[in-house]
Image (cartoon, rainbow, N blue to C red):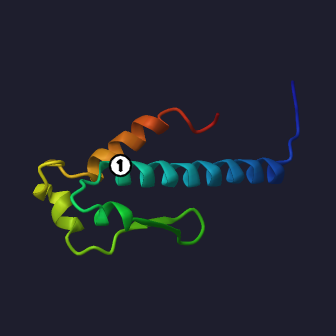
Amino acid sequence: MITGTFNAKRLTQALDKQLDQFVAGTANVLFRNIKSNTPVRSGLAKRTWKKSKRGNKKFAITNPQPYVPLLDKGRSKQAPRGFFKPAVAQTQRTNKGRLGR
């Protein structure tokens, strides 16, 4: 028989720190992808994206321009399929297998 002990508190803290870093990194990648996928006419929609932390492991990516939802629905010839879903898919591809490194 083999027995062993480990410090569960230290392991939990290390995992929590790694998860925090992963979530923050994912939020940064998604923010960059959304900005880069936003169609440009005057540049206002692209310039006004904001990312903010909303508590533990929560981030908000917002844009105050009232026409941004229309752009995301394909109103622009530059992004006929929108930009949010493609940015999320791009972020998922980027992060595939990244947790645990």
The residue under label 1 is: 36
Q: Residue at x 40, y 35 (%)?
A: 93
What is the quadrant of residue 60 in the picture? Answer: bottom left
What x and y, as percent, mark residue 72? 20, 58
As helix, strand or loop, the secondary structure at mark 1 comes to helix
Q: Residue at x 25, y 55 (%)?
A: 40
Q: Residue at x 16, y 65 (%)?
A: 70
Q: Quadrant of the C terminus?
A: top right
Looking at the image, residue 41 sits to the left or right of residue 20; the answer is: left
What x and y, as percent, mark residue 35? 37, 54
In depth, the one of 42 and 80 nearer the eye is: 42
Looking at the image, residue 1 sits to the left or right of residue 27; the answer is: right
Q: Furthest-top residue in view?
A: 1
Looking at the image, residue 55 sits to the left or right of residue 70; the answer is: right
Q: Furthest-front residue in view?
A: 42
Q: Residues within 10 Å of mark 1 (few under 14, many from 20)?
A: few
